[in-house]
């Protein structure tokens, strides 16, 4: 009988402790989550609620040789650099606009390690001026070719990212687009990339 009472008390204490430690980890004080549309499905993007979650192993190694893993500049030409809150706002706006695209500029191998919901994988290697599919890609982005030049008046606004501040894949993608005449006001750069996305505990797919 005494053993049963002790067991009940211990179970009660554990339950109370669990309730006390349960915390709603928000994105900001006002924002708990957003819903993104990804290939016809809705995905809720929020911060990971488990306080014991560790950083994705792909981003734990800081001993990355330069080149190719060199620290990137904060600004690329006049392209606007954004952080996580602006990326989330961009994703929210994508649901109501066909003129916005979130681009994962990493190679397929990196992309398979996890990506931001609602983004499409368009490796920087496919955005070279002499690339095999570049004309088709630029057309799909809203560009109109006239002779040897392109008009991007009706082109989509692109938010481009890769692995983080030590990764040049997004930088190269943006520079290639700029070289082909893509307007700076239709480009955004998420410098923090997947490392910061993982570090702040946001949903990946």
Image (spheres, helix red, strand yellow):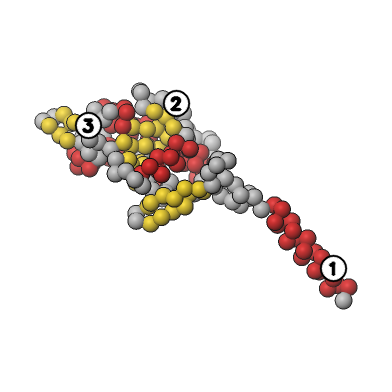
Q: In x, y percent, where is residue 80?
A: 39, 28
Which quarter of the picture shows residue 180? Answer: top left
> Label for residue 74?
2
Residue behind mark 3: 153
- Camera-side mark, 2 or 3: 3
Residue sitting at x 70%, y 57%: 18
Q: In x, y percent, where is residue 32?
A: 54, 47
Instruction: Quadrant for the N terminus, please.
Output: bottom right
Instruction: Answer whether labels 2 and 1 touch (C-beta < 8 Å).
Output: no
Mark 1 surroundings within 10 Å by alpha-carbon count, few (fewer than 14), some (14 through 19), many (20 or more): few
Q: In x, y percent, where is residue 186?
A: 31, 32
Residue sitting nearer the eye, 180 or 10: 10
Residue sitting at x 47%, y 34%: 83
* Cα distance in 3D space between marks 2 and 1: 59 Å
**Residue extending furthest right?**
2
Secondary structure category for the residue under label 2: loop
Instruction: Answer whether labels 3 and 1 touch (C-beta < 8 Å).
Output: no
Residue sitting at x 22%, y 39%: 142
Taking 177 as reference, is 60 above or below it?
below
Q: Is residue 94 left or right of residue 66?
A: left
Taking 88 as reference, is 14 above or below it?
below
* Cα distance in 3D space between marks 2 and 3: 26 Å
> Label for residue 6?
1
- Camera-side mark, 2 or 1: 1
Q: Is residue 21 left or right of residue 193?
A: right
Mark 3 surroundings within 10 Å by alpha-carbon count, few (fewer than 14), some (14 through 19), many (20 or more): few
Residue sitting at x 61%, y 49%: 24
Mark 2 surroundings within 10 Å by alpha-carbon count, few (fewer than 14), some (14 through 19), many (20 or more): some
Q: In x, y percent, where is residue 4?
A: 83, 73
Q: Is residue 94 left or right of residue 71?
A: left
């Amino acid at each position: 009988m005494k053993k049963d009472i002790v067991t009940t008390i211990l179970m009660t204490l554990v339950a109370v402790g669990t309730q006390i430690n349960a915390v709603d980890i928000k994105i900001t004080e006002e924002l708990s989550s957003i819903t993104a549309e990804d290939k016809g499905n809705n995905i809720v993007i929020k911060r990971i609620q488990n306080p014991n979650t560790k950083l994705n192993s792909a981003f734990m190694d800081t001993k990355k040789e330069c080149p190719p893993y060199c620290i990137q500049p904060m600004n690329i030409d006049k392209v606007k650099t954004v952080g996580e809150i602006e990326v989330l706002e961009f994703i929210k706006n994508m649901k109501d606009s066909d003129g916005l695209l979130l681009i994962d500029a990493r190679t397929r191998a990196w992309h398979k390690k996890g990506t931001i919901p609602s983004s499409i994988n368009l490796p920087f290697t496919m955005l070279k001026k002499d690339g095999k599919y570049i004309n088709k890609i630029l057309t799909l982005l809203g560009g109109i070719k006239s002779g040897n030049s392109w008009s991007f008046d009706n082109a989509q606004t692109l938010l481009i990212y890769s692995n983080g501040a030590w990764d040049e894949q997004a930088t190269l993608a943006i520079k290639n687009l700029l070289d082909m005449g893509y307007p700076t006001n239709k480009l955004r750069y998420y410098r923090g990339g997947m490392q910061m996305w993982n570090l702040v505990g946001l949903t990946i797919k």
